[in-house]
Amino acid sequence: MKEEERLERIETALVEIKQLLNLIIGGRAVKEMEEPAGYLNVKQAAVLLGVEPSTIYLKCHTGNLPHTRIGKYYRFNKNELIRWMGNPEITVVDIDQYVDKYLQKNLFRG
């Protein structure tokens, strides 16, 4: 399992733990552990948009989805995503070009 996938699973588990804690203690002490106000991670953005996380990564890579990158992590402003849902900007992707870029980036690293 790749480290990025492991980190994403940990992040998802933390979100679930925060939600459970929020239910248990009534939302009092969990606020400081949350993402900055109005920002979502990949999994939360996927739930909001009703798609798989892989679709979110693809749309970010092709520049079709408004996002911010913090290191290697994607973050999404919830208001921007809601606005984008009303008027998505769609870019046509050349699949051969996409595959070539992916292979160069991920397989041909020396």
Image (cartoon, rainbow, N blue to C red):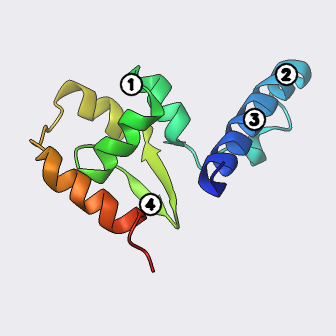
Q: Which of marks 4 and 2 is nearer the N terminus?
A: 2
Classify residue 11 by image quadrant: top right
Q: Marks 1 and 3, Cα distance to the nearest angstrom?
A: 20 Å
User: Which residue in the protein does label 1 denote?
Assistant: 49
Callout 3: helix, strand or loop? Answer: helix
Considering only order in the chain, which callout, 2 or 3, is on the residue closer to the N terminus? 3
Gap between marks 3 and 4, in whole Å? 21 Å
* Residue named by callout 4: 69
Is residue 4 in view from this perspective?
yes
Q: Which residue lies furthest to the bottom in this view?
A: 110
- Residue positioned most to the right: 25
Return the disc, 1 or 2, that comes first in the chain's sequence: 2
Which x, y percent locates residue 25?
A: 90, 24
Q: Pick whichever, 61 or 69, lies toward us.
A: 61
Q: Distance of mark 4 from mark 2, alpha carbons?
A: 32 Å
Q: Badge 3 local density, few (<14 within 10 Å), some, or many (20+)?
A: few
Callout 2: SS: loop
Name the kind of residue labelled 4 in the image.
Arg
N-terminal-most mark, 3 or 4: 3
23 sits to left or right of 82: right
Residue at left offset 54%, top offset 43%: 41
Label 3 sits on what residue type? Ala
Q: Name the residue under label 2.
A: 26
Q: Nearer the viewer, residue 75 or 78?
A: 75
